[in-house]
Amino acid sequence: MLGHLGFSYVGLVYLLMLFIPNLIWINKKPKGYNTLSESRILRATERTGQFLVTCCAIIFCDFNLKPWSVWNIWLIVSFAFMVLYEIWWVRYFKSQKALKDFYSSILGIPLAGATLPVIAFLLLGIYGKVIWLIIAVIPLAIGHIGIHIQHRKLISKEQ
């Protein structure tokens, strides 16, 4: 349950699926996007979670593929959430890149850009039976989803 140290190629794939769209997003931010109103506490919590999740995803080899068992279902569902996250990004990049597009849902999952990767990494932690990743997801979820909720509330007031 604690995890075995070693390199995780599955963790690396997840991180690439996470970081590449975010790097593209730097030049394709929604019109009117502003981080000045973000809570410093939520931002610090998010950054802590990002750091911990990134480290855990890479350093525990328990996420790598294993012979088939019922536990593989956790990996399949987790990966499905990451694929859905990629689809959400494609939809965003094809949109007019308005704030409503950035804070949109997909398949009924609210704030999909924040929620989907958090769920995926939580399920990856369950698949690998690595408590450290499961714990690391908590500050990521609080900070990342919390910031997105704040932003969405602000744009709702402005409209």
Image (cartoon, rainbow, N blue to C red):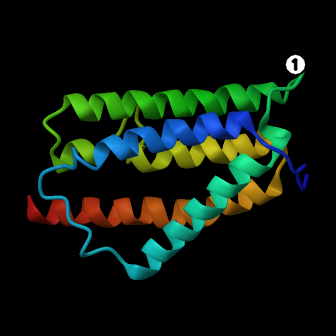
Place of residue 5 in the rendered image (x, y in percent of width and height, measured from the top left): 87, 51
* Quarter of the rendering occupied by the C terminus: bottom left
Identify residue for label 1: 68
Residue closer to the observer: 7 or 73? 7
Please state the total of marks drawn on the protein image: 1
Place of residue 140 in the rendered image (x, y in percent of width and height, measured from the top left): 56, 61
**Three-letter amino acid code at the position of disc 1:** Trp
Q: In this view, does 73 lie above or below 135?
A: above
Side (left or right) of 107 relative to 13: left
Q: How crowded is mark 1: few (under 14 residues within 10 Å), some or many (20 or more)?
A: few
What residue is rendered at 74% in x and 46% in y? 125
| Residue at disc 1, secondary structure | loop
Q: Is residue 82 above or below residue 135?
A: above
Q: Quadrant of residue 40?
A: bottom left
What residue is rendered at 69% in x and 41% in y? 123
Q: Is residue 110 above or below residue 33?
A: above
Residue closer to the observer: 37 or 53? 53
Q: Quadrant of residue 14?
A: top right
What residue is rendered at 76% in x and 40% in y? 8
Side (left or right) of 70 relative to 35: right
Residue 74 visible in this rendered orientation of the protein = yes
